Amino acid sequence: MAGNQVKWLLLMLVFVSSLIAVSSERKAISASRTFKELNRNGPYLGLITVFAPEEDAFFATGAFKPNPKHPYVDLSGRRFRVGSIGGSKVIYVRCGEGMVNAAAATQQMLDVFRVIGIVHFGIAGNANNSMSIGDVIIPKQFAQTGLWDWVKFKATIPTNDVAELDFGSYDVPNGGDNELGSIGYSTEFFYSKSGKPNAPERTLWFQTSQNWLEVSSRLEGMALEQCVNSSLCLPEKPKVVVGLNGATANIFVDNAAYREFLYTTFHVSSLDMESAAVVMTCLSNGFKVIVIRGLSDLAGAEDGDNTIRLFGPLAASNVAKAVVQFVKTLRGFHFQLSI
């Protein structure tokens, strides 16, 4: 009797496993058909933002119209939304914070979907005193400022590093040594579709696509929001600025001294945690890319608490409007994006 029960249980286990396998196979076949159908209807413009408040501001514009048949597909925990903006076909995804998330979502977008390029957007810290909170910046290039050679106390940084941060220079009072020593800023190993296999270039700056940057210059002068609400407004009207530099690292900068160091050393105006990864991934694969960022805070230079909580929603709203306007403007140069 016991033997029969064991056989019965084994048969049931095999049967259930078979059902699960068949179900998984059917889902895979269905997903494959969906991707093929979507890509037949392409190409699309890829849109990538970072976290929920930016996504909320983007959808609040009302410009994104979901695809009636396939409004979204889920891949590796991310929801890729399919639709259009102003008659241009787009696929949108929220990547999550940090460079690894940004690179992973970008590579997945490029591999799975038929896109012509990527528009990356979100909020950022402001490192440039000539810029203001609420402004929208469209940089021409990004540096990855999080690759460090942290050397021993009183050691020298490697000769191929492009900059040095000496902690002792920031001692209070001045003049003492600091056992944290110094860090040297290294360059990226850049692998590209056009390069030789296993022969990366050492690169500091990654340029966005020049022709898209020229298209984005038409956004200069567009109207942006100045007020969070009736009682909280910025002193000046925000503006769109094209062609400055940006920096990316897995660091949320809220420190005035480090902000000043980054500006004076690298001449960067925006500080974020994803853009360089998106740009580098697109360039590595031979795709066009542009980055649009709204300045939400002074990266530690303001008195009191960081203003991202106050002006983050305004910055997200302004950058969302700029993205929508860029997509509509770009359509005139890429007719294949039209529905």
Image (tube, helix red, strand yellow):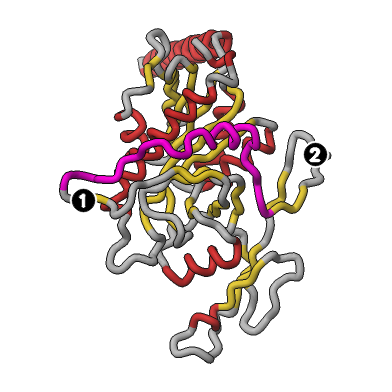
Q: Give me the residue at 49% from left, 45% from top.
A: 241
Q: Position of residue 90 (x, y in %)?
A: 48, 21
Query: As drawn, is 240 to the left or to the right of 333?
Result: left
Q: Give me the residue at 57% from left, 52% from top.
A: 245
Comparing 288 with 94, the one in front is 288
Q: CA distance from mark 1 to mark 2?
A: 51 Å
Crowding near pointer 2: few (<14 within 10 Å), some, many (20+)? few
What range of the chain is rendered magenta? 204-230
What residue is shown with label 1? 232
What residue is shown with label 2? 195
Comparing 332 with 297, the one in front is 332
Identity of the amino acid at label 1? Leu
For the N terminus, give its image quadrant: top left
Q: Position of residue 89 (x, y in %)?
A: 49, 17
Of marks 1 and 2, the one in the foreground: 1
Q: Give me the residue at 62% from left, 82% from top.
A: 153
Identity of the amino acid at label 2? Gly
Comparing 215 with 206, the one in front is 215
Query: As drawn, is 36 to the left or to the right of 313?
Result: right
Crowding near pointer 1: few (<14 within 10 Å), some, many (20+)? few
* Marks 1 and 2, the one that precedes in the sequence: 2
Picture layout, residue 160 above or below residue 224: below
